[in-house]
Image: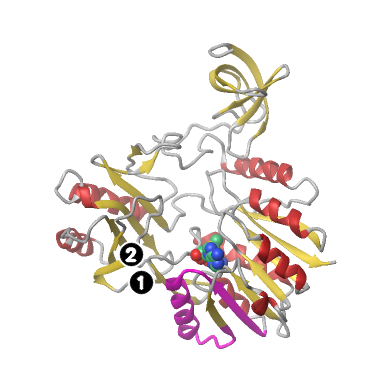
Amino acid sequence: MKNEILRCKCVDMSVDGQGIARAGDLVVFVKGMIKGEEADVKIIAEKKNYSFGIIDKLIVASPHRVTSDCPIAYKCGGCDYRHIDYRYQLELKKGVLINTFPDLNVHDIEACDDPYYYRNKIQIPCADHKMGFYRKFSNDIVEFDDCLIESKIANEMIKDLKALLLNTKKERYIRHVLIKVGKMTGEVMLAFIVNSFDVDLSEATTFMTSKYPMIRSVIMNLNDKKTNVILGDEERVLFGEDHIYDEFDGIKVRLSLKSFYQVNHAQMLKLYHLAKTLSNVDENKDVLDLYCGIGTISMYMSRFARHVTGVEIVKQAIENANDNAKMNDISNVDFVLADAGKDMDKYIKGKDIVILDPPRKGVSKELIESLKKNQTRKIVYVSCNPATLARDLELFKDTYKLNDIYPVDMFPYTIHTECVTSLDLK
Ligand SMILES: C[S@@+](CC[C@H](N)C(=O)[O-])C[C@H]1O[C@@H](n2cnc3c(N)ncnc32)[C@H](O)[C@@H]1O
């Protein structure tokens, strides 16, 4: 019953980071409760087969419980695991993966050596005289001083941007602020996503670029549509170039505002190395890299393959990919601007290895059918969403042997896990 207090034991963790607790036959999802803990839990909502609760009194604490080091943890919607020591987070994430892939062998998660300040991209809304993250499931903005997973320079820049823009006439024009940082080069891109180009941001730009000489690009991006999509189509460069550079494993990359780039630079190479190892690539093999972004996996694989073709839907990313190949003198790659979910037969035909690295929604049924029809011998699937990976593997399994799951911790302190796996034609 609602408001009732029940003694519960936490037996597992849910995919969204809540403790799954039991009080007799009743299952209660409890935010902030850790597997193994016992607590008096106050029921806050009831469904037909389970309830939701909050910890009223912790009776037996997990030895892995730590005091959160973030003052806004659990308010901002970012980190879900700040109350759990890092090593145990990995065990819990592995447990969730074992539940998600009950028939496959799940390896230990590749840990992040430094799980602090790891993100190289931040995008935050601006409204109601605030700049910060959205509270989970809400449009309220939670401000922060020092986000422990964003880059240090982005934290500093946001303090300045708040002082420069909030409570001024310019504030109502700014929808989002986006900062990208090249972890190896130190180069920074600052973007103001505005609802009209009629705002003069020259003073803010001059201040920021003088204070932060590593800013190489300031962009104003227009988004006047009422949607959840952050970036609009039109851009104006306010300072420097429309791109920045970064580097990974000796490969230089150009990166535009709209182009995807893995957010955790240190883990990116581990991820690509795994993908390469699982692919069994060699110099006699042709590779198709679907959802290739700015061509990072393609260029990495090109060192080992005969040829790599990358396919990507974002125009700026394909432009970056072509520039990147040229800049790095890589001649055995080519890139195609196309929807990887449709009409891929002509690209798949004759390829020895196909790499899939789709966004969270996974791949289309049409693409899966096309891979089966063309009898692609080896598929490597890189996924940032275990749920859609599991769904897609189910569709492959009549034709392909499914292999082990190799997780990589790209997103420490959050519930998210990246996985790589390979499939062999039966
Ligand atoms: C998870 S990212 C991977 C990018 C790249 N493999 C990397 O490691 O940086 C997914 C990419 O798929 C692109 N994308 C999304 N939908 C697509 C589609 N239907 N066809 C092709 N590319 C798509 C996104 O723009 C993004 O660059």
Name the residue beneath numbered marker 1: 243
Pick the quarter of the image with the N terminus: top right
Q: Quadrant of ligand 1?
A: bottom right
User: Residue 401's quadrant in the figure?
Assistant: bottom right
Secondary structure beneath disc 2?
strand
Find out whether the residues at labels 2 and 1 contact each other: C-beta distance under 8 Å: yes
Name the residue beneath numbered marker 2: 189
Residue 123 versus residue 209: which sits nearer the camera? 123
In percent of width and height, residue 332 lies at: 59, 86
Q: Is residue 148 visible?
A: yes
Disc 2 residue type? Answer: Met
Magenta span includes 329: yes
Earlier residue among tags 2 and 1: 2
Q: Which residue is outermost to the right?
A: 426
Figure disc tally:
2
Disc 1 residue type? Answer: His
Q: Is residue 241 left or right of residue 36?
A: left
Q: Is residue 237 left or right of residue 41?
A: left
Residue 350 versus residue 38: which sits nearer the camera? 350
